[in-house]
Image (tube, helix red, strand yellow):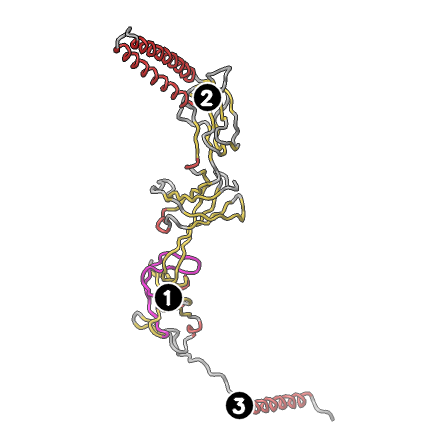
Amino acid sequence: MGTTFDERTGFRIAAAIAACVAIAAWLQGCGTKAAPTADADTPPLVRSGDEIRIPDHSPLRDSLVVGSVESRPMTRAVDAPGVVQADPTLLAKVAPPASGKIQQVFVKLGQSVRKDAALFSLDSPDVDQAIADQARAESALLLAKENLDRQTDFLEHGISARQDVETAQAAFAQAKAEAARTTARLNGLGYRGENKSDPSILTIRAPADGSVIELTASPGTYVNDVAAPLVTIADTSTVVVNAQLAERDLAYVKVGATAQLEFPAYPGVRRSGVVASISDVVASDTRRAAVLVPLDNRDKLLKPGMFADVQIVESQSPRLVVPTTALLQSEGATIVYVEKSPWMFAEAHVTVDYQQDDYAVIDAGLVAGDRVLTKGGILIHGQ
């Protein structure tokens, strides 16, 4: 008669138990020991007054990282929007020297011109008057000279008195001065007498090399405001970037600071310059001040009116820095945890000047060499 199901099951259970006992005995013989268990009564931290101690077997020890406060040279970078402008020292605004009607315009907007090139012509009554005045003055000078020569000859032959000669000399000097005045007036108007068919036409010429960046002159227009420029010529081989610096950043930018500039019109193009001047006035509406950065532009890549992204870099003396992960906020103040002794910490209030990248520049509250919690401070804060 064969073995029943219950008997077979009992045999298997007994065999399994025997195998387990054998394995346990083998492990014990090999010297295997059970892992020690953590002390369930160890607290994560112990607070004593203003100090926090992390006990030996606290699980927090694996999460806290301590580092030293460093003193290192820092470079502060300030960003500002900017606009490319023509160098004001290389800018010529050409206004009409007299009122009159514009006859012709010889240039176009954006055109490059050389010094003395014709810009526009003007038919001016003032020029007519100046020409007539000079003609009269030249005629009067000629008569005065003839009279002086005649009186001098008479005096030599005993016909006239010395007083007559002196009177002729005075009249000649006056006529000479008037002729010089009328000539200077024509020269001041830029008159050269080029248009023989119509001498009253005055040609206005470029005072310097450059490009026409503004043009409001148009043929047939009558102009009477001699202070309003009709043509603006700029030498754009040098341009100036006008960066608008926020009021809060003024303390960190000085004349001579290095500026790095990029231009949305030319992705990847980067230029370097130096801050030449900082405005003494902050605009009331934008709360920004103008910072001027001259740039070499002989390749004519940069155009006045073009936008620029400006980053001004100011090198500073060595400063105390900590990782920004060490900073915590507590009741409106910034604090860090300073290690007073191994695994013993206390709060320290600090003043942060600014943050850059992953570091915070400390103005007050720490000294070089202090050891602070750089990671995990939030785990003990408020506990």
Q: Is residue 295 left or right of residue 181?
A: right
Task: Indicate the amino acid at tag 1.
Answer: Val
Q: Is residue 352 magenta?
A: yes
Residue drawn 33% across and 64% down?
A: 366
Front residue of this view, candidates 74 and 142: 142
Give the answer, above or below, for where 377 lies relative to 130. Answer: below
Give the answer, above or below, for where 365 lies relative to 5. Answer: above
Front residue of this view, candidates 210 and 221: 210
Q: Quadrant of the N terminus?
A: bottom right
Task: Indicate the amino acid at tag 2.
Answer: Arg
Front residue of this view, candidates 130 and 54: 130
Q: Is residue 106 magenta?
A: no
Q: Is residue 230 left or right of residue 369?
A: right
Residue drawn 43% across and 30% down?
A: 93
Q: Quadrant of residue 44?
A: bottom left
Residue 31, how many percent across, how many down?
Answer: 53, 90
Residue 58, how many percent across, how many down?
Answer: 41, 75
**Residue indicated by mark 1:** 69
Q: Is residue 369 left or right of residue 190?
A: left
Cα distance in 3D space between marks 3 and 2 = 117 Å
Residue 101, how many percent across, how many down?
Answer: 46, 19
Q: Earlier in the sequence, mark 1 or mark 2?
A: 1
Helix, strand or loop for disc 1? loop
* Numbered circle sitting on residue 31: 3
Tell me if mark 1 has few (under 14), some (14-19) or many (20+) residues whose alpha carbon lies within 10 angstroms of its own. many
Between disc 1 and disc 3, the foreground one is 1
The span shown in magenta is 342-369
**Residue indicated by mark 2:** 192
